[in-house]
Image (tube, rainbow, N blue to C red):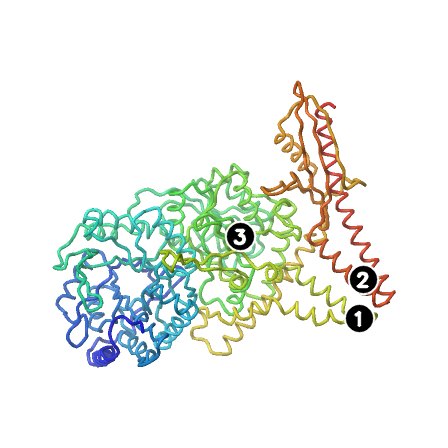
């Protein structure tokens, strides 16, 4: 059996002593003190943001009775010296401390992170013989520190060995940690609970934790920062704490230890972490009841003499997170508002509270008919009144009046964290990003419907290609380098309500620029407060998708969807976990130091079930079943349509029932069920709302593209003799340009395609173009083009489906059904031919134009 730490009998005796100490020592009435709480990616004490600047403390040699931390004079001296050097938090990693330690910490203004050592009992999951009552032990440990004002947060465990996780299986370990988490919450519902993980078991999926905490030891600044950004993506909208960082002075020298800690602290705060713990306060360290002699990670020696690292850490803490910067770039914050009287005050009031020295605010009133102008006028900001011309026009108007180096757009139904601009500035100044986004998180206490909307699909989210580079950032919280935004001409005014953020990101990327994300540059963004409001929003998004497809047809597939390359983040993307094909990379014998989950994309069938067009498939099957009155075998489509309709729900419902957002903490059973069923309902109607907007604006699988050209021949060859030599690549680029000028939907062939250009005529067909070039004397060329028809996946599926039913009707000798489905088959074939003819017509027109330009 695997165990670490105290033995069972020693642990139980220790808990008895702790319990007696808890109730015998008078610590005062602490319930009136403000409690730590989490708001987005940060920890607050009451209403004050608390940045953790901590050190780990212990483990030390235990007394004969098994108790640690009994030398009150030494603790008093250590804590006083910590406080003097700018340290504000102490982490007790391996032993739940006695209450008098928390009393001393409180005396010196220190907070404490305690550990429950769940890793010490994980061996009992394998061999349950003589297992202690783990639940009782955990609850007793929590009670020893209950309601103490020095208590910052509780770690349920620290670094369960990777070999044990492999042995037990990661899901069993995750369930074990979730069980411990719930025990803590049962005793102290308001406690901030985390688990201290490390890179070797990074893959543990622990979404229930209040904060994410990792021990990371990396000596390369680039590698360290890169991994911090990775951890920020794992943390999502939760705080990220570095549980241990540091360097061994015995092997690297005290000067290098000091220099390393300086840049590590800077990197931790620059990447938006809410704090860190240095390992360790002192070189004195006991583990497994033995003194560790071959490590010197401490900021002080065993005799508490300060090392250079202590002075370096003290100075770094004093200037963190933002005090070391003397000059800050100028930002222009632009708020575009239309009838936003419900939220504009909160938005502008939040901007007044920003802790940033160099920015302006421009409010663009886009023709509001409520009292928005009256509210905004009470603030000391520049206000521009404009007739209602749409969101993109308002954004451009703000851009024209801005004098900042960077332009930031904030929605009128959002308000920023106090350090919002500081994190954006750090990211801009340290990278070459043309645009940077940040998280948008639902505010607290907004109501049941808004919380359900937040966990339903369709909320604004960022999409990450790598841990640092974004594919898309949402418009409610996005910032731009002004020169880059002006270079692309600002925003496209055809996007009046939505879609402008997607379009501007694509245009920047087309110019070769990159987009980033500042993980802690967060804003609080209100969701729709009614189901009707959510419906209208999603219909509007469907319209925006249609407008984007009209402008960017190359980016959309045959079904009218944009296959994103990156990973989608946000509270409303819980369901996507069910679609992912993942594997854990552990290395040979589980020896890899960084063990991650690798996502191999989504399961194709399950992805299709969450598309808006899935409703069309279900409706088609239901309609076919009605024709069972004419031909009875068609009744088989009735249960099939029901099964298809339930398929997406079967994937979503288990995930929704796992949700336990913070607002449900003090709610009853029925309120929780109401939230769950409302969220399920929103999952059901969201694709339908999106489909409504898409159909209304002709973004359908059966849509047609350029109808101006037509060719009866959908395949063939065209040959050209020319004495005007042009490089084949340039010739194809010219052909592509000519096709774009006539609004043809043309796509370049990829690395493994045996064609050069593909043209879409519609949702059912198109053509593919291949060019060959022969060079002859005196700069002559013989150019050949081959046009080949291409059927889309939709066309192939439709043909095969109807063909099978037609043949079945013929075999059953039901001539009426056979005639009907034969006619439907001919209609599909006609539509395929029509789409291919349009694409072929565009191809012939562009080729003929090249012939004319060659003078042949």
- Numbered mark located on residue 807 in the image: 2
- Point out the tag, 2 or 3, that comes first from the N-terminus: 3
Query: Which residue position holds label 1?
Result: 628
Local SS, label 1 = helix
Residues at marks 2 and 1, CA–CA distance in whole angstroms: 16 Å
Estimate how packed mark 1 is, as few (under 14), some (14 to 19) or many (20 or more) residues with alpha carbons within 10 Å: some
Could you give the CA–CA distance between mark 2 and mark 3, rounded to whole angstroms?
Answer: 59 Å
Instruction: Name the foreground residue: 593 vs 724.
Output: 593
Give percent across and percent down for residue 212. 37, 62
Q: From the image, tell me which residue sits under label 3.
A: 337
Q: Earlier in the sequence, mark 3 or mark 1?
A: 3
Residue name at image x 62 percent, y 65 percent: 685
Q: For this view, does 291 lie left or right of residue 462?
A: left
Question: Real-space Cα distance between discs 3 and 1?
Answer: 54 Å
Percent coordinates x, y for residue 25 in the rendering: 19, 78
Question: Residue 506, how many percent across, how many down?
Answer: 55, 44
Which label number is shown at residue 220?
A: none
- Label 2 CA crowd tier, 10 Å (few <14, some 14–19, many 20+): some
Q: Position of residue 125 (x, y in %)?
A: 37, 75
| Quadrant for the N terminus in the image | bottom left
Marks 2 and 1: which is nearer the front? 2
Position of the C terminus by quadrant = top right
For label 3, the SS is strand
């Amino acid at each position: 059996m695997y165990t670490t730490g105290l033995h069972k009998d020693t642990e139980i005796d220790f808990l008895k002593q702790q319990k007696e100490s808890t109730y015998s020592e008078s610590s005062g009435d602490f319930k009136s003190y403000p409690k730590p709480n989490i708001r987005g990616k940060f920890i607050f004490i009451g209403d004050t943001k608390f940045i953790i600047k901590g050190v780990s403390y212990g483990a030390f040699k235990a007394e004969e009775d098994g108790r640690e931390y009994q030398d009150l004079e030494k603790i008093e001296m250590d804590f006083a010296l910590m406080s003097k050097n700018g340290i504000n938090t102490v982490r007790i990693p391996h032993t739940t401390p006695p209450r008098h330690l928390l009393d001393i910490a409180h005396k010196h203004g220190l907070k404490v992170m305690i550990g429950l050592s769940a890793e010490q009992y994980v061996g009992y999951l394998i061999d349950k013989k003589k297992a202690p009552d783990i639940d009782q032990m955990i609850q007793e440990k929590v009670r020893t520190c209950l309601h103490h004002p020095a208590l910052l947060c509780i770690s349920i465990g620290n670094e369960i060995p990777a070999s044990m996780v492999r042995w037990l299986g990661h899901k069993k370990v995750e369930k074990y940690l979730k069980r411990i988490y719930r025990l803590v919450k049962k005793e102290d519902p308001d406690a901030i609970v985390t688990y201290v993980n490390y890179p070797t078991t990074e893959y543990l999926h622990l979404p229930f934790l209040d904060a994410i905490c990792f021990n990371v030891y990396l000596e390369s600044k680039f590698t360290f920062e890169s991994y911090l950004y990775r951890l920020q993506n794992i943390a999502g909208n939760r705080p990220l704490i570095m549980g241990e960082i540091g360097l061994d002075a015995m092997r690297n020298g005290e000067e290098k230890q000091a220099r390393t800690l300086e840049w590590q602290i800077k990197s931790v705060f620059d990447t938006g972490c809410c704090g860190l713990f240095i390992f360790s306060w002192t070189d004195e360290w006991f583990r497994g009841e033995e003194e560790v002699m071959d490590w010197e990670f401490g900021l002080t020696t065993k005799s508490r003499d300060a090392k250079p690292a202590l002075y370096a850490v003290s100075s770094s803490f004093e200037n963190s997170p933002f005090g070391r910067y003397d000059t800050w770039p100028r930002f222009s914050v632009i708020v575009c508002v239309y009838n936003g009287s419900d939220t504009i005050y909160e938005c502008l009031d939040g901007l007044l509270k920003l802790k940033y020295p160099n920015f302006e605010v421009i409010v663009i009133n886009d023709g509001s008919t409520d009292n928005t102008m009256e509210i905004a006028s009470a603030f000391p900001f520049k206000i521009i009144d404009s007739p209602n011309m749409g969101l993109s026009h308002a954004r451009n108007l703000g851009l024209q009046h801005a004098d900042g180096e960077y332009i930031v757009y904030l929605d009128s139904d959002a308000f920023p964290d106090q350090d919002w601009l500081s994190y954006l500035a750090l990211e801009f100044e340290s990278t070459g990003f043309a645009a940077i986004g940040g998280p948008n998180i639902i505010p607290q206490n907004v109501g049941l419907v808004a919380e359900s909307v937040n966990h339903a699909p369709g909320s604004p989210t960022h999409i990450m290609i790598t841990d640092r580079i974004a594919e898309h950032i949402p418009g409610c919280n996005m910032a731009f380098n002004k020169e880059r935004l002006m270079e692309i001409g600002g925003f496209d005014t055809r996007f009046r309500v939505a879609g402008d953020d997607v379009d501007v990101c694509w245009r920047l990327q087309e110019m070769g620029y990159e987009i980033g994300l500042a993980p802690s540059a967060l804003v609080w963004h209100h969701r729709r407060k009614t189901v009707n409001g959510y419906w209208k929003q999603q219909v509007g998004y469907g319209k925006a998708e249609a407008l984007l497809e009209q402008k960017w047809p190359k980016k959309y597939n045959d079904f009218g969807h944009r296959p994103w390359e990156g990973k989608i983040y946000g509270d409303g993307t819980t369901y996507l976990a069910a679609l992912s094909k993942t594997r854990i990379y552990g290395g040979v014998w589980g020896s890899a130091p960084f063990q991650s989950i690798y996502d191999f994309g989504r399961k194709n069938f399950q992805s299709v079930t969450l598309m808006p067009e899935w409703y069309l498939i279900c409706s088609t099957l239901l309609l076919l079943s009605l024709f069972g009155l004419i031909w009875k075998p068609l009744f088989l489509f009735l249960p099939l349509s029901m099964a298809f309709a339930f398929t997406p729900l079967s994937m979503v419902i288990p995930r929704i029932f796992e949700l336990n957002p913070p607002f449900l903490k003090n709610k009853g059973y029925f309120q929780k069920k109401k939230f769950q069923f409302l969220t399920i309902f929103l999952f059901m109607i969201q694709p339908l709302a999106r489909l409504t907007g898409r159909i209304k604006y002709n973004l359908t699988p059966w849509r047609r593209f350029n109808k101006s050209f037509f060719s009866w021949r959908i395949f063939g060859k065209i040959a050209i003799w020319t004495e005007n030599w042009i490089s084949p690549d340039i010739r194809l680029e010219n052909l592509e340009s000519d096709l774009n000028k006539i609004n043809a939907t043309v796509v370049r062939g990829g690395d493994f395609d045996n064609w050069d250009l593909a043209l879409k005529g519609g949702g059912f067909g198109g053509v593919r173009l291949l060019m060959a070039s022969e060079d002859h004397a005196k700069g002559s060329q013989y150019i050949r083009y081959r046009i080949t028809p291409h059927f889309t996946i939709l066309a192939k599926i439709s043909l095969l489906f109807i063909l099978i039913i037609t043949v079945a009707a013929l075999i059953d000798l039901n001539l009426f059904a056979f005639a009907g489905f034969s006619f439907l088959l001919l209609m599909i074939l006609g539509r395929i031919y029509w789409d291919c003819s349009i694409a072929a017509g565009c191809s012939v027109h562009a080729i003929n134009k090249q012939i004319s330009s060659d003078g042949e």
